[in-house]
Structure formats: C-alpha cells, structure tokens
Amino acid sequence: MTRSANRPARRLGRYTRRGFLVATAAVAGGVAFGVWKAREVPPNPLAPEEGVALNPWLLIDALGVTVVVPRAEMGQGVRTTLAALVAEELDADFAAIRVIHGPPAQAYYNGALMEAGLPYPAYALTERQRWIGRQMAVLPKLLSLQVTGGSTSTVDAFEKMRLAGATARETLKRAAAARTGADIAQLLTEAGAVVLPDGTRLPYPELAAEAAAIAPPEVTLRDPGQWRLLGRPLPRTDMVEKVTGTATFGADVMLPGMKFATVRMNPRLGGPMLSFDPAPALALGGVERVIDLGTGIAVVGATTWHAMRGAEAVAVDWGPAPYPETSAEIFAAIAAAFDAAPNSTLRDDGEIPPPAAGDVSAEYRVPFLAHATMEPMNATALRTADALEVWCGTQAPVVTRDKCAEAVGLDPAAVTVHTTYLGGGFGRRAEFDFAVLAARVADAMPGTPVKVTWSRAEDMRHDFYRPAAIARFRGRVAGGRIAALEAAIAAPSVTRQSMGRLAGFAPPGPDKGHVEGAFDQPYAIPNWRVAGHLADLAVPVGFWRSVGNSMNAFFHESFIDELAHAAGADPLRFRLDHVRPVHAPSARVLEAVAEMSGWGEDAPGTAKGVAFTHSFGTPVAEVVEVADEGGSIRITRAWIACDPGRVLDPAIVEAQMVSGLVYGLSAAAMQEITFAGGEVAQENFWDHDALRLHTCPKVEVRILQDNPHMGGVGEPGTPPAAAALANAVFALTGQRIRELPLRRSVRFVA
Amino acid sequence: MRLTVNGTPREVGDDPDLPLLWALRDVLGLTGTKFGCGVAACGACTVLIDGAAVRSCQVAVADVRGAVTTIEGVGTPEALAPIQQAWVEHQVAQCGYCQPGQILQAAALLASNPNPTDADIDAAMAGNLCRCGTYPKIRAAIRRAAAMAQGAGP
Ligand code: FES
Ligand code: FES
C-alpha cells in the first residue's frame, strides 16, 4: 500500500511546469477523460442522473490512472474519499492510483454550496426545497465557485465522481470489445484492467487511446451493497508523504533561482502606510530588497529568516485602523447593533410573550478568533512577461487566479494556479490575500520566482477572524418544557464581508450564516424567535471552521442548559424531550452519547456537560467531562455521536469529528483575539495557544448512519464543543460562564 | 559553515546566526522540517542533534555541535522507519504539517525511553502543537512504535 500509493505523489511532488502538462494534456499519450472539456461546457448540473458524457475527473495515461480531486486537501481526507468515489466505479487498483488537484476550472464548481445556503433549517428541508437547492447549483457553476468549504466536498462529489468512474469503465469496456471482438456483456473489470472471457487482462492504459474515440454510454451507478472501497476505512493517499516529509505544502515549493521574501502589512487592519524607511533593513546582512506594497512592505532576503529579520527592521509609520481601536469599543459597536432593526428573523414561530417574572435571561459574548493554521500563510509566484504562475494551498483556486490576475494586470487566462497541500485551512485559505500579495511581490521582480512566507505574528495579526459576537436570550419554561424562546444575535457579518471581497457586492436579504446554529436547531419550541443584527464593523472577519455555528451553538446550547436548570430537568433528557418530536436522527445521537458517556454517573470530582448541534446536515451530540485538579480544571474525556447519513470512510469521519472537537475546545477554553491601539494584541502560540497532547481529552466517537441525507463532517464536530465544555464547568463548579474564552473565568490545567 | 545532515556533510552558507531551520529549508532545500512559529512554541521545526530533539528555529548554525537528523533522514517512502510505519498504521496525519516535528520528538523519546508511560509521553510531547487535533492518534502511534521496538513485530 505504502509504496505504490506514494510513488506517483513523489513524482508530482515538485510542481514543475512539465509535471503539470503531463497531468493535463492528452498529447503525452494519455487520455484525459474530459480534462480538456473543462474549458468548454461543464457538465449539466441539473440532470446528472443521465450520465456525463466526458468528465473532468479522470486521466488515464501510460503511467496508470490519475484522479483529479479538485478540492483542497487540508487534512480532511478529501484526496482519499473523493478518489475512492472514482476508483469504486472504475474498478481501479486503489493502491496504485495517483491523485492530483488539477487546474482551477469552472467544471469543478461546488454545487452543494447552494443547498447549504438555503434560508431554511437543514433538518427540515422538504424535497421541494432540496430540489430548489439543486437548481441553484447553476449559480456556483456560473460563478465558477470551485471552493472547498461548508463541509460540502463529499456531498457535491458523491454522484459526479462515481459517474466519472462508471462512464470511463464502460467506455474502456467498449474499447476492449471493439478491439477483441468480445461480447461486451462478457467483459469484466478488475484492478485497473478489462478482463476478457479467457482471463486475458487488458490494463486501462493500453485501452485508453481507443476509449477516447468512443462516445461514452449512459451508465447506472452501482448499488452501495456492491461497494468494495466505499464505506470502509481506506489507507489515506496522502499518509506516506506526510510522515516522510515529502508532502509539498505551499511553504515547501522550491523553484530554480527562487528568492525568499516576507511581508509586513499595516497591523491596523486595512489602514494605510504613511511612510517607511528601508535603510535599517538594508543595512542588515542578507537583506536584498524592500518593496513598497502601498499598505505595507515586502522584504526579499537570502533566506526567509533574513527577510523576516529585515521586515522587522524597516521603520514604518502606520496610519489608523478603519474601526474602533480597542476591544471594549468594538464590543460597544457590536452591542449598538441591537438598537437597529434586525437583518433576519429566520425563526419566527408563535408569539413571544412580554417579559415576566420567572423568565430566564442571559447575555453571552464570544471573542474574535484566529484560524492559526499550523502552516503560516504563504504563496510562491513567478511573473514573466505575459504570464503569472502561483503556487499555494488554497480553498478557492478560481477566485485566487482571478484576483491575482487583477492584481498584476493580466487576463485570468494568463494566470496558472497550482494548488499544493494545505497545512491547515479551517476557512483561512478560502481567502486570497496571501496569494495576491505574493503575486504583487513577484510583479516587482519579473523573471524571478519568489516565495513569500508570513511570520507567525503576521499570520496571527492579519487574519479574517471569526467575528466577536453578543447574544441576548430570554426564555420561559413551563411544565418541564420550553414555552418561549427569544434570541437576538449581534456581530459583524462574515457573508457580507466575504462577498464584498469576492464579488464586490454585499448580498441583500437575510444573512443565514449569521444565525446558523441558533435559528435552525431541531427543538420543539412553540413560541420561538431568533433575530440577527449585523454590526457594521471593518474588522476583517471570515469563515472559521463551522462559521456562524461556532458562536451560535455556544449561545443556544448554553441557554438550553440554563433553561433545563430552571426547569429542574436533566440537561440531556431535557434536550431529548424537545428534539425527539422534531428530528429522529438528532434524538438518536443524543441517546447514543448518553449511553457512551455513562450520562448520569460521575466519578467524584468530575462532571459532564452536553451540547448538541445540527450543522452542515449532520446532527452531532457531544459530552465533555471535566475534573477538578487542585482547583484547576482538566478536560478529561469526551464522547461524540454523529449521524452524517451514509458514511464513505468511517476512519476519516471519526478523525474529523475528533479534530473538530479539539479545535472547538481549544478556542472555548483558551483563545481570543483582542484589539488595542487598533492592532491585534496576540502574536504567537504563546498567547494564542491550543490544546496539546497532555491537555487533550480521551475521545470516543460513534457514527450512526440513519440520517436519510448525507451531511458534512469537516465542521460539525466543532459547534457543540464550547457549550458542552461550559456546561460541564457549570456542572462541576456551579459557575455559569457566559463569556469565552473560559479561562477568563476559570483556570485550566496547563 | 558546514554541518552534518542525515549523515552527509553539507555547506550552509556563511551567516553564523542563521537558524538551523532556515539553513535546512532554504539553503539545503530539506523542506520536511517545518516552520510554525519561530519562537519555540510549536515544535514543527523539531530535528535531532546527536539524537536529542531540538527546536531548529532556535539554534543558530554556528552553535550546531553534532550530527543533525531531519525527517528526511528518518526514513523514506520506499523504506519507512518503524516509527513512520506506526504513524501510517494509525493513520495519524490530517493536514500533516506538524507531523515531521511530532515524529522526531517521539523518536527522541523512544530512543531514551523505549517503554514510555502516558505521563512520559505527555511530558515529551507537550511542546508539539497539532492544530488538527491528531493527539489521540499520536499517542497510539507512539505506543505502537514502542511495542514494535520491543519485538511485538509489525
Ligand atoms: S517553528 Fe520552531 S518551535 Fe515553532
Ligand atoms: S496534522 Fe495538521 S497540524 Fe497536526
């Protein structure tokens, strides 16, 4: 497994022009099943059941089978699961297939993004609403939304990429029948070859050229009962590279004659640069050049370290930030948004009664959060007379191509983007700022490839943060049930800001992402309103793993706990009572997590908290156990039950659930981004830390598959984590903490 | 300046202050050693010097007094070291960016303590951050590598 899976990756590991041509062109003796078609009309998204004539996901050449997985591999295993979709139908030898990312192309639009954007709770989508979502897939196509995000990759690819494999298989069989005169009904396919009735094997590469001349037939997808690869844990196609240091991340791109650079942009985000003096930097050894980028500088050095040292030495006079200077003022601006009319009231059921004695009220706040991917932002670029080449880890290669083109005054067709492995994404690499900066640095030094790597401080202090937010909840319980629940949530809008950056306009209408995780939960509450208030703030905000759910699940699931407490009910039982009548798969994950965690029985000095969120189509329930360790809190154990519907690779789903939980717990316990003097105060992992091996709980995951619709897995593990932890701390200490990070209020074991 | 890297003498330029990390990555092109923080806070840059795990972002090339081992010197895709086999068996990596540092830190632990307890593993690995949260699998892979070395066989 290890050798064959890795061999091709090594060959493609260095991003040379030639390597890329081999992968994209048929002229080298290979047959790309439709790779060239990517430049023509992408497959009709409205009728995929009828088969796609030629498809952009498969290349067969003399070296074997290459699957194009046009999604960013940032740890979520997409290069394994999506490749398996093709291999399953193609009857390819999974251990021998190669996987490449492929070029940015409209054909690789993410059709599942739109269904995710429908302004309805996902658990309650009707068939008609899902149908509308599929029709809306035309929008990502027209906008060329080749995006890895929203936990949609598998849902989007599930049919497309199996069809790609099935179509190719049947075409190859036709080629074999035409060549040998055999009856096509007698032909089998197995391990990368067509097998004739007499047992003769015709490997796909030998048939590929003939197959290319044959019109692909319509195909029927196999019944899941016949699957050999899907539904079971597969060895990840990226594993051997990643344990041998041979995986090429953006930061690892090496080109002949390449220079090393870094950037230092205005830490008052979006503010101008008034003046700068490069002399102190140029006086240092190894500093070759200081480039004026308008709102900051780039320094080119003998090594990245020389460049970073030089960048620190440049004397710069920064202009002011376009937002209030301190966290206190920023929170005041967010609170002020409650005074204006709401942008959305996506949940508006029944009647909200006027306030009365006995109502439960609470105000919560969460801070800005950095993504802090393990690999700092970086990109490599080469500007030539009439073209630009960019290498980087990106979740949005088409947008990156277009924005880089715009930045250097080229037509997008003159720009090539090579997508490398991503050393973490979490939404940060859905932005294009790091690629555009590299393009601009390269533009200043035509003919010379340049790798632009950010320092950790630059990365931490120039993020598109998870927004800070304030939520006000009021609720009433009667007879052990929630009689009424009113919520208002105020924060700057990720949707508006990111659409402004991407498309130059902010979409009108209700912002679903702003209230997701609060308005769309499957609870039976007769009188229920959730209003979203958008704060107009220029602090850069962006997509952070699970987006709005990351904050709203903390608000909603903390408040559900408060209501359970007010009702004198067990918090898990209380949730079940409200969820069971609405959504059976959600109730089942709660039941599962109760059983797994031994809910109701706590060892002395320990306590458990529970939270539940339905996000990205997947209900997830989490129980977190905490222990008092000499006055400090240790997160000892956690249990996750999820139901993403049909599971294609249970090991990858489990890994994503654990990852999402750890990411959420890290933020909830310890992380915040604060502002002082218009600048982010945090710089590095010493003041923006995360759980580590010795503070990470033991985690157990149970995956149910009763959900009739496939959901995502990359993000849904994150939302319940914060509330489950805060609820556990309440159970342990009696202290209800309504502000994150929790370490502002309690001490954790370090 | 000369260093011995993965058993081979290498020339790394003339700046004595250059951190080993950048000599490896930018001068020698050994990009398996990762830059994560530059301030000894993440462990991504971990290499071995005479078998001891060090943060290569904190060691100037002039101060390197022993033989350097990077992830490229541990094993190759064609010939994985046992510790890498353990990592593959447990399918540890997600994004993978922290893993070379994790593996070298674990290799140093196992070299000095072939049968580490959970507390030993905690203490040794506390400096190595993983933003993907692969910790439970890292722990399992370390145990597996220890068992393999004790003769439990692959
Ligand atoms: S880069 Fe050296 S410890 Fe983080
Ligand atoms: S695997 Fe991504 S940071 Fe560890």
Image (cartoon, coloured by chain):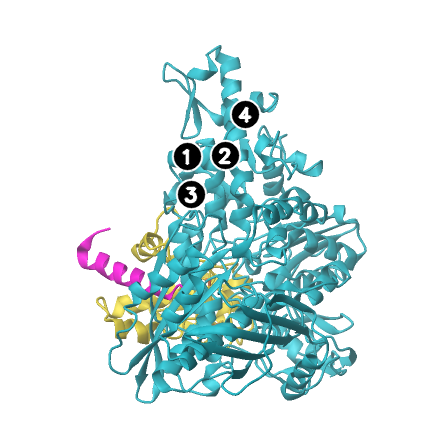
Mark 4 and mark 1: Cα distance apart in space: 16 Å
Mark 2 and mark 1: Cα distance apart in space: 9 Å
The amino acid marked with disc number 1 is: Asp
The amino acid marked with disc number 2 is: Val
The amino acid marked with disc number 3 is: Ala
Q: Residue at x 51, y 33 (%)?
A: A165
Task: Report the front residue among A192 and B81.
Answer: A192
Q: Residues within 10 Å of mark 4 (few under 14, many from 20)?
A: many
Q: Which residue is mark 2?
A: A65
Which portion, as a residue range, is magenta? B134-154
Task: Report the front residue among A421 and B71.
Answer: A421
* Foreground: disc 1 or disc 3: 1
Mark 2 lies on a secondary structure that is: strand
- Residue B123 visible in the picture: yes
Q: Quadrant of residue A732?
A: bottom left
Is A320 placed above or below A448 here? below
Q: Chain of mark 2?
A: A
Chain letter for cyan, please.
Answer: A
Is A168 placed above or below B80 here? above
Residues at discs 3 and 4 both on one chain: yes
The amino acid marked with disc number 4 is: Ala
Q: Residues within 10 Å of mark 3 (few under 14, many from 20)?
A: many
Label 1 CB less than 8 angstroms from ligand 2:
no
Q: Residue at x 63, y 48 (%)?
A: A133
Q: Which residue is mark 3?
A: A5
- Specify whether residue B142 is painted magenta: yes
Q: Quadrant of residue A457?
A: bottom right
Task: Report the front residue among A692 and B8.
Answer: A692
Residues at discs 2 and 3 both on one chain: yes
